[in-house]
Image: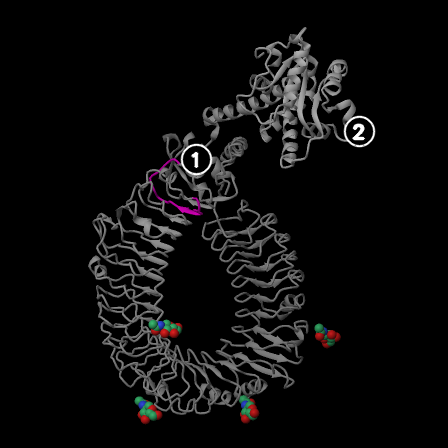
């Protein structure tokens, strides 16, 4: 990787600029409250559900751009040579790491030091020859370690030091040749349960070479080592239950097991290929005489009959596996002692003949496996086995079935006959199989069913008939299979279905009909109308072709309202296809629809109006080239959309498609070259975008997409680093993400200019407002406070304490005290509220004011220039006018102490508005007629509070 430093530099600069732009972009989007999806791109890998998947990318080193949130990391099948200390440094949440099939020959010290959560590590199939000191340091949580098929010969004493929690270790197919090395492995692992050392170079096994530190060890596999001597003088594996000591060595292995209690808990023993003198073999079997359940003796070279006879005397042994023993017949007495065996596996032999009474001793046999032999017919020996429930006759040469073949098999639950040469069935074949649940008949030559399923097999749940030569399913052919759930009919040549071909299959949930010869005509017969429980129907690769999009008289799936998955595909026909508009009618619960590779040229905009629950839509490999903007409208729940190879010239059709829940979009190999920002914004839920195989225009039209793709964390843009430029000519063959943004300064600079200008303007307006209008701001603040208080008092109808609250400025106090107070309180007898006299000391002034206003019937504002300058006074007007508006009460009386020029009133437009409509009096204008002034004031105080348009007018002066 990183071969061109020039390129890297270019990218970094581009990246920096991109980031600046992004900040602006983010600011802009935050301001405008758009929430677009964000993108990120990994140079090579794909992240799905917290797993980074980098399989088969020809990687030579561990990529470093993996998000640190991943918990799984699959790097298998690459060309990594070396693990470096920094490779996994940030991936502290990793629980699974897969390095299978690389070329790793070196792991640097501390490479895994930060992987404190790692539980499973796979280093299989690499080139490690030596495990260095401390290689696995830090892997405290590791439970499973696989290092098979390397070249490990030596293990350093501290290699496994940290692996104190390991439970499973597989070191098979290496070159360990010394048991002392195994001790080094084991001594740090008190919890190890399973150790696999298959196919190494261990030549001896002496218990004194190991310590007794593996008390927990339950399974050990020492098979395929050239062990010549197995000597156990100490009980080093007291809890061993599974023991594999098979061998491919030609000379007999010598045994020396001291105490008869050693190995006495082994229940599964595998001695495949092991050569031993009969005496040693007897010793071994004696050790396990009370614990053995399962014995595997594959590929034995000598003494097989003797071994079978010996082992069948062990009363607990119930499972016997005898594969690859080149048996060509089974005689009457081979299993005569095996009365306790319940499972017998004779597969992978060459059996042609089985004597009729060969299994007559096996009264308890439940599972009999005879696959991969050369049987020409169903052996009669299988018939009278009273307990048989599974019979496997697959991969033989059976070319005919007779009516007696399965007679009396009333307990049989599973029958496998696949991979034979059966040409046809008969109606009598399965009549005794009352309990049969699974019948596997695939890959034969069956061309006729001959009513075999018409009446029997009431309990069958799965029937495999795929890979045969069926051409038609006659009416009622499966009528007896009332419990059938799963029917495989794929890879036949079925062309003809009747209207009632599937009658009786009311419980069928899954049917595969792919790779047959179904046509439009077949579907016109409405053959699926009985399958009311069907959930999955696969009809890919048939001959279904429509050349019109008008409605069908009988939609083919109209009665499959439970169907959840439907796949159709027409690969074999060339030419222009369409889908009838009501093709999907009735599929109200459909979740997945696949119509790949149909050469569809057109989709009617109402095609999906019948499938409102659809979540996954795959219409890849068609020739649609553009979608009707309303095509996707009914698909509110769509989560995954596959539109690869659909000759799309633009993704802009998605802008108005309202796909707000879409998470996954794959649009590979199309013809668009620009991805507009609007498309991205129209898909707010997107987490995965795959545009592989499109050729992009490497100019500023894609700048927005590029920036988004390379940098964000939510949407993964799959393979973005490999998107190629096709235009302009100078960029041809270069990759899109390496395209330098500096050329876009004009465009992006303009965005930058506009947005920055906006922000500066906003800032300036705010500063100006504050500087020149801070009193208005304070005013606004008090309006708000007044409003708060206003709502607080709104519903309170307290009796008024005062007749009027007098709002005035201290400078006008002399007038209030000398003129107003004596007149109104003295002569006219009103009860007034004055702040210097009646405000409660200690109470917040704002509360005092509102209490005064709401506690008085009226508020008289004594207005002078100084009053207008005082913030409290205007506040009082505000509070009073709120009461006017909110209580619909006319409480405000304005008394002008001096002539106020209009321009001085202009900031108080609320007051001006009031002046246009409300009661006000002017003291200077009153002049000699002071009595009239007081009389008017008295009238105003007497007046009812209800505002009314035509109340008598007190106005003494024109509106200022
Ligand atoms: C292992 O054996 C030694 C003596 O042979 C004994 O002292 C030690 O306790 C044993 N360890 C365990 C874990 O049993
Ligand atoms: C196992 O034990 C039984 C008695 O319980 C004995 O008859 C049989 O021969 C023994 N088999 C072997 C292989 O030791
Ligand atoms: C089936 O069982 C009956 C009675 O157990 C027996 O008479 C008959 O011969 C058996 N059929 C076959 C084909 O073995
Ligand atoms: C479908 O299967 C259930 C049991 O799985 C059974 O009770 C029911 O009768 C079956 N339906 C039909 C139509 O046979």
Q: 238 or 756, which is in the foreground?
A: 756
| 566 horizontally vs 366: left or right | left
Residue 671 in magenta stretch: yes
Q: Residue 804 or 423: which is nearer the viewer?
A: 804
Number of the front mark, 2 or 1: 2
Above or below residue 908? Residue 537 is: below
In the figure, 666 relative to 241: above or below? above
Residue at the image position 25 percent from the left and 62 percent from the top: 516
Residue 115, quarter of picture? bottom right
First along the sequence among labels 2 and 1 = 1
What span is colored magenta in the figure?
A: 660-674
What count of labels does the image hold? 2
Which quarter is ligand 2 in? bottom right
Q: Which x, y percent locates residue 26?
A: 53, 34
Rendering quarter of residue 241? bottom right
Of 720 and 819, which appears nearest the observer?
A: 819
User: Which residue matches tag 2?
Assistant: 841
The residue positioned farthest toward the top in the image shown: 928
**Which label is found at residue 170?**
none
Q: Main secondary structure of the magenta part?
A: loop
Q: Which residue is mark 1?
A: 677
The x and y percentages for residue 750 are 48, 24
Instruction: Report x, y in % for residue 261.
Output: 64, 84
Q: Position of residue 11 (x, y in %)?
A: 50, 34
Report if residue 562 is visible in the image: yes
Q: Secondary structure at mark 1?
A: helix
């Amino acid at each position: 990787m990183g071969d061109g430093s020039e390129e890297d530099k270019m990218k970094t600069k581009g990246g920096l600029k991109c980031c600046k732009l992004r900040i602006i972009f983010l600011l802009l989007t935050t301001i405008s409250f758009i929430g677009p999806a964000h993108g990120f791109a990994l140079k090579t890998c794909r992240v799905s559900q917290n797993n980074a998947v980098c399989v088969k990318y020809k990687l030579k080193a561990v990529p470093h751009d993996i998000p640190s949130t991943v918990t799984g990391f699959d790097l298998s099948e690459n060309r990594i040579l070396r693990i470096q200390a920094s490779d996994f440094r940030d991936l502290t949440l990793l629980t699974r790491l897969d390095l299978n099939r690389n070329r790793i020959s070196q792991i640097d010290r501390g490479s895994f030091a930060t992987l404190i959560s790692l539980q499973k590590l796979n280093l299989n199939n690499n080139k490690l020859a030596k495990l260095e000191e401390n290689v696995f340091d830090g892997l405290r949580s590791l439970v499973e370690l696989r290092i098979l098929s390397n070249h490990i010969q030596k293990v350093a004493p501290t290699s496994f030091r940290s692996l104190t929690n390991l439970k499973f270790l597989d070191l098979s197919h290496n070159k360990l040749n010394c048991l002392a090395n195994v001790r080094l492995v084991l001594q740090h692992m008190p919890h190890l349960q399973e150790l696999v050392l298959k196919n190494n170079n261990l030549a001896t096994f002496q218990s004194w070479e190991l310590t007794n530190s593996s008390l927990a060890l339950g399974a050990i596999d020492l098979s395929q080592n050239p062990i010549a001597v197995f000597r156990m003088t100490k009980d080093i594996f007291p809890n061993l239950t599974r023991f594999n000591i098979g061998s491919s060595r030609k000379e007999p292995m010598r045994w020396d097991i001291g105490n008869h209690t050693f190995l006495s808990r082994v229940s599964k023993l595998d001695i495949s290929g092991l050569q031993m003198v009969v005496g040693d073999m007897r010793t071994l079997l004696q050790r396990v005489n009370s614990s053995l359940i399962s014995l595997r003796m594959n590929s034995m070279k000598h003494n097989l009959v003797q071994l079978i006879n010996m082992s069948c005397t062990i009363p607990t042994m119930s499972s016997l596996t005898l594969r690859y023993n080149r048996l060509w017949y089974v005689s009457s007495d081979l299993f005569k002692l095996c009365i306790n065996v319940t499972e017998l596996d004779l597969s992978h032999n060459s059996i042609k003949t089985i004597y009729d009474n060969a299994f007559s001793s096996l009264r308890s046999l439940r599972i009999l496996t005879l696959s991969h032999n050369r049987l020409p017919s169903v052996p009669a020996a299988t018939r009278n086995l009273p307990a048989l429930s599974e019979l496997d006759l697959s991969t033989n040469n059976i070319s005919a079935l007779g009516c007696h073949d399965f007679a009396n098999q009333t307990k049989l639950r599973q029958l496998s006959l696949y991979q034979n040469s059966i040409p046809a069935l008969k109606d009598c074949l399965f009549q005794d199989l009352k309990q049969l649940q699974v019948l596997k008949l695939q890959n034969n030559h069956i061309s006729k069913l001959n009513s075999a399923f018409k009446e029997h097999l009431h309990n069958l749940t799965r029937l495999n008939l795929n890979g045969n030569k069926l051409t038609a399913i006659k009416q009622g052919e499966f009528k007896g299979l009332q419990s059938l759930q799963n029917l495989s009919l794929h890879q036949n040549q079925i062309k003809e279905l009747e209207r009632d071909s599937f009658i009786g299959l009311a419980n069928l949930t899954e049917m595969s009909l792919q790779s047959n010869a179904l046509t439009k005509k077949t579907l016109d017969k409405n053959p699926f109308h009985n399958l009311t429980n069907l959930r999955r129907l696969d009809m890919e690769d048939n001959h279904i072709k429509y050349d019109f999009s008008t409605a069908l008289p009988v939609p083919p799936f109209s009665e499959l309202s439970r169907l959840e998955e439907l796949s159709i595909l027409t690969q074999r026909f060339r030419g222009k296809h369409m889908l009838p508009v009501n093709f999907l009618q009735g599929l109200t619960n459909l979740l997945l629809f696949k119509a790949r590779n149909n050469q569809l040229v057109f989709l009617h905009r109402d095609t999906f109006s019948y499938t409102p629950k659809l979540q996954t839509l795959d219409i890849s490999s068609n020739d649609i080239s553009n979608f009707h903007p309303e095509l996707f409208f009914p698909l509110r729940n769509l989560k995954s959309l596959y539109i690869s190879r659909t000759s799309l010239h633009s993704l802009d059709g998605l802008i108005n498609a309202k796909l707000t829940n879409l998470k996954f979009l794959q649009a590979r190999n199309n013809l668009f070259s620009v991805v507009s920002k609007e498309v991205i914004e129209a898909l707010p839920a997107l987490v995965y975008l795959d545009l592989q195989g499109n050729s992009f225009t490497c100019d500023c039209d894609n700048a927005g997409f590029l920036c988004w793709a390379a940098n964000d964390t939510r949407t993964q843009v799959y393979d973005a680093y490999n998107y190629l430029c096709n235009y302009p000519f100078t960029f041809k063959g270069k990759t899109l993400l390496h395209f330098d943004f500096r050329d876009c300064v004009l465009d992006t600079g303009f965005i930058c200019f506009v947005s920055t200008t906006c922000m500066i303007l906003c800032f300036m307006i705010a500063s100006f407002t504050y500087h020149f209008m801070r009193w208005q701001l304070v005013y606004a603040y008090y309006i708000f406070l007044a409003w708060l208080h206003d709502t607080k008092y709104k519903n309170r109808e307290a009796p008024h304490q005062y007749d009027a609250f007098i709002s005035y400025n201290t400078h006008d106090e002399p007038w209030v005290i000398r003129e107003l107070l004596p007149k109104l309180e003295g002569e006219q007898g009103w009860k007034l509220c004055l702040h210097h006299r009646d405000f409660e000391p200690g109470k917040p002034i704002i509360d005092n004011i509102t209490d005064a206003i709401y506690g008085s019937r009226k508020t008289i504002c004594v207005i002078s220039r100084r009053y207008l300058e005082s913030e409290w006074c205007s506040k009082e007007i505000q509070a009073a006018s709120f009461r006017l508006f909110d209580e619909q009460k006319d409480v405000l009386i304005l008394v002008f102490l001096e002539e106020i020029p209009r321009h001085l009133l202009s900031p108080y437009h609320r007051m001006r508005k009031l002046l246009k409509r409300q009661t006000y009096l002017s003291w200077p204008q009153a002049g000699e007629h002071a009595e009239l002034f007081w009389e008017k004031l008295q009238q105003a105080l007497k007046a009812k509070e209800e505002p009314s348009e035509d109340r008598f007018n007190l106005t003494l002066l024109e509106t200022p």
